[in-house]
Image (cartoon, grey):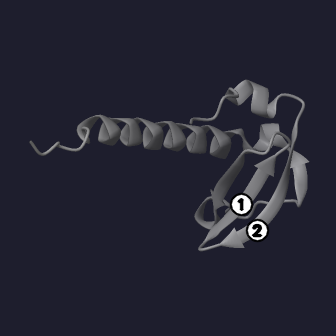
Amino acid sequence: MGWSLTLKELVKGKTVRFRFYWDGELWYETADGFEFPVPIGDTGTGIFKAEDGAIYYMRWIRKHLAERAEWENERAAQARNIGPPAQDE
């Protein structure tokens, strides 16, 4: 199932909290529980706080929402290609 909240609902008046670092990415979580990565290559000389306003992370939230939607579309397409098992007669 895809994520049900819109980008606006995830960021307006909300915060994000740092969760962990893994494989070149800072992972954050919105107040609504949506987790998303911030690639270290995108950070430049910026300061990334443990907790901050979600609006400042909108770029990465939007990107991850789009990726999740693409994954869901691919999953659904694959599910359509896998028909029911053939029955032996």
On the image, the x and y values in percent for residue 82 come to 26, 42
| Up-down relation of residue 50 to residue 8 (above or below) | below
On the image, the x and y values in percent for residue 32 come to 82, 39
Quarter in which the N terminus is drawn: top right
Instruction: Check the image and name the residue furthest to the left.
Output: 89
Who's the residue at 90% across and 30% down the image? Answer: 13
- The residue at which mark 1 appears reads as 27
- For residue 14, which quarter of the picture? top right
| Up-down relation of residue 46 to residue 21 (above or below) | above
Checking the image for residue 20, the label placed there is 2
Instruction: Check the image and name the residue furthest to the bottom.
Output: 23
Asked if disc 2 and disc 1 are in contact, CB closer than 8 Å, the reply is: yes
Label 1 CA crowd tier, 10 Å (few <14, some 14–19, many 20+): some
- Between the C-alphas of marks 2 and 1, the distance is 5 Å
The disc labelled 1 sits on which kind of residue?
Answer: Trp
Checking the image for residue 66, the label placed there is none
Specify which label sits upstream in the sequence, 2 or 1.
2
Depth check, front residue: 77 or 68:
77
| Up-down relation of residue 67 to residue 19 (above or below) | above
